[in-house]
């Protein structure tokens, strides 16, 4: 195999990281530019080239489709903001953990070890476990909405319901007295969630989320055998 | 507007260009300071097409490979002009404060 063929194979492997629709439209052209830019004698994909292609692939995966309407684009941006907020909640909980513990002790000085354990289990651990899941969830929802997946809106509505219940439950348990910063961040995250809901369920967004009749679920549910 | 976006739009302001031409032109416009790579360029081109700032002018097959030429849309031209005016105003303000007499103060 010649140097050029070897290099082309390497570039093709890197381009396989891009989403299929992006690849279908651009990979032949990008390959041409990559080969034209490569100096004579180059056999392998360089480190900087590989990093650039991986970064480009990541952006192509996370960005909304070109036909995505502005309302959904705005919702996708809000979802990425939600991921950043969720990360903020995690950092807040970790940084303020000792002050939260002190606040609990000040309020309930006569706590037994078992009661203390229960409070940690119900107030601190859920935040520390759920926040990273929340970050991944927001990024995943942003990706799914940007691609126009029909089920994404259903998932968003369901998680909004859960988030509302969580917020109401936290308010009713006076969690605000334990961790006001966490409570404020949680409320802001809920507002972001609500705004994203309004945008993706708006009239201009509806056409973008039409169910795909070729999807397996719809074939199974439909009349075809 | 990011610098890479500004330079890509500037490269297309003089006329249609294909991907390799844009890469070379961006290097030239920036005096060799900015060197775009194909991965960055094509994600930017895809985004700019989505935003309606550029569009495909025509496609050719050269040596068995697709070569796509891009051009600025009216909206892209207006956005570039607005950004250039903003940068020019900022630069003028900075230079005038560095040396009100006309040259750069030392």
Image (cartoon, coloured by chain):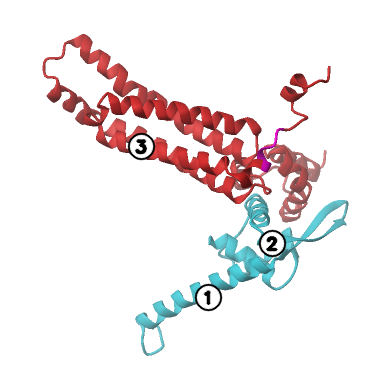
Chain colours: A red, B cyan
Q: Report if residue A85 is visible in the image.
A: no
Magenta-colored span: A207-211
Q: Are dots 3 and 2 in contact, CB under 8 Å?
A: no
Tell me where residue A154 appears, x and y as whole percent.
58, 30
Tally of marks: 3
Q: Which SS class for mark 2? A: strand
Q: Quadrant of residue A224?
A: top right
Residue where numbered disc 3 is placed:
A187
Q: Is residue A73 left or right of residue A123?
A: right
Mark 1 and mark 3: Cα distance apart in space? 41 Å
Farthest residue, direction bottom: B101
Residue toward you, A116 or A199: A199
Q: Quadrant of residue A7?
A: top right
Q: Main secondary structure of the magenta part?
A: helix
| Quadrant assignment for the C terminus of chain B | bottom left
Point out which mark residue B54 bears.
2
């Amino acid at each position: 195999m010649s140097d050029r063929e070897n290099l082309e194979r390497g570039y093709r492997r890197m381009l396989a990281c891009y989403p299929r629709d992006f690849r279908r439209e651009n990979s032949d052209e990008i390959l041409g530019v990559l080969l034209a830019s490569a100096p004579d004698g180059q056999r392998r994909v360089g480190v900087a080239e590989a990093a650039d292609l991986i970064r480009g692939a990541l952006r192509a995966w996370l960005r909304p489709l070109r036909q995505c309407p502005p309302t959904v684009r705005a919702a996708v941006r809000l979802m990425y903001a939600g991921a950043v907020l969720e990360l903020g909640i995690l950092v807040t909980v970790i940084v303020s953990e000792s002050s939260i513990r002190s606040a609990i002790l000040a309020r309930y000085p006569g706590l037994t070890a078992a009661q203390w354990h229960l409070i940690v289990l119900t107030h601190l651990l859920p935040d520390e476990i759920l926040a990273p899941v929340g970050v991944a969830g927001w990024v995943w929802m942003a990706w799914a909405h940007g691609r126009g997946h029909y089920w994404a809106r259903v998932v968003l509505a369901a998680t909004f319901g859960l988030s509302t219940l969580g917020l109401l439950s936290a308010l009713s348990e006076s969690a605000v007295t334990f961790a006001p910063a966490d409570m404020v961040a949680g409320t802001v995250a809920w507002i972001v969630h609500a705004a994203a809901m309004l945008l993706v369920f708006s009239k201009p967004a509806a056409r973008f989320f039409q169910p795909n009749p070729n999807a397996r679920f719809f074939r199974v549910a439909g009349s075809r055998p | 507007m990011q610098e890479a976006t500004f330079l890509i739009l500037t490269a297309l302001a003089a006329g249609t260009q294909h991907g390799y031409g844009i890469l070379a032109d961006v290097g030239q416009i920036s005096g060799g300071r900015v060197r775009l790579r194909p991965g960055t360029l094509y994600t930017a081109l895809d985004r700019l097409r989505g935003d309606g700032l550029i569009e495909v002018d025509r496609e050719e097959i050269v040596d068995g490979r697709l070569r796509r030429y891009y051009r600025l849309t009216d909206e892209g031209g207006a956005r570039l002009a607005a950004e250039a005016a903003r940068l020019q105003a900022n630069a003028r303000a900075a230079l005038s404060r560095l040396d009100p007499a006309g040259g750069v103060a030392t």
